Image (cartoon, rainbow, N blue to C red):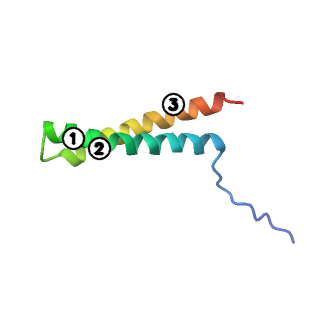
Amino acid sequence: MTSNSEPKARRTKDQAGALLAATTAFLFISDPAHEAANHLHYEYAHVGAALVSLALALLAYWVGLRAMRKLP
């Protein structure tokens, strides 16, 4: 009896590149977003910064995935 020992879920190169773009965007925007949120509303600065950072990370993932799929 033979079994297929390959992992079922694998990330493609396109998804890996897009994930790198999203992670980079999140890390670069988190500090400026926290500073801006801190000036706007002190009590919810962490929540606001996290929401803005996540939104931009999702946008970077989408743009990165589309860009990586167009590459040869």
Location of residue 15 by image quarter: top right
Query: Is 45 rendered above or below residue 71?
Result: below
The quadrant of the rendering that contains the N terminus is bottom right
Left or right, residue 16 beside residue 51? right
Location of residue 27 by image quarter: top left
The residue sitting at 59% across, 45% down in the picture is 16
- Residue bearing mark 3: 63
On residue 35, the disc is 1
Contact? badges 2 and 1 (CB < 8 Å): yes
- Residue bearing mark 2: 31
On the image, the x and y values in percent for residue 33 come to: 27, 39
Find numbered disc 2 in the image and state the secondary structure of the residue it sits on.
Answer: helix
Identify which amino acid the numbered label 3 is placed on.
Val
Identify which amino acid the numbered label 2 is placed on.
Asp
Q: Nearer the viewer, residue 38 or 48?
A: 38
Find numbered disc 1 in the image and state the secondary structure of the residue it sits on.
Answer: helix
The residue sitting at 14% across, 36% down in the picture is 40
Q: Quick one: label 2 or label 3, which is nearer the N terminus? A: 2
Q: Quick one: label 3 or label 1, which is nearer the N terminus? A: 1
Identify which amino acid the numbered label 1 is placed on.
Glu
Left or right, residue 69 beside residue 22? right
Q: Nearer the viewer, residue 23 or 12?
A: 23
Left or right, residue 57 beside residue 68? left
Left or right, residue 70 beside residue 38? right
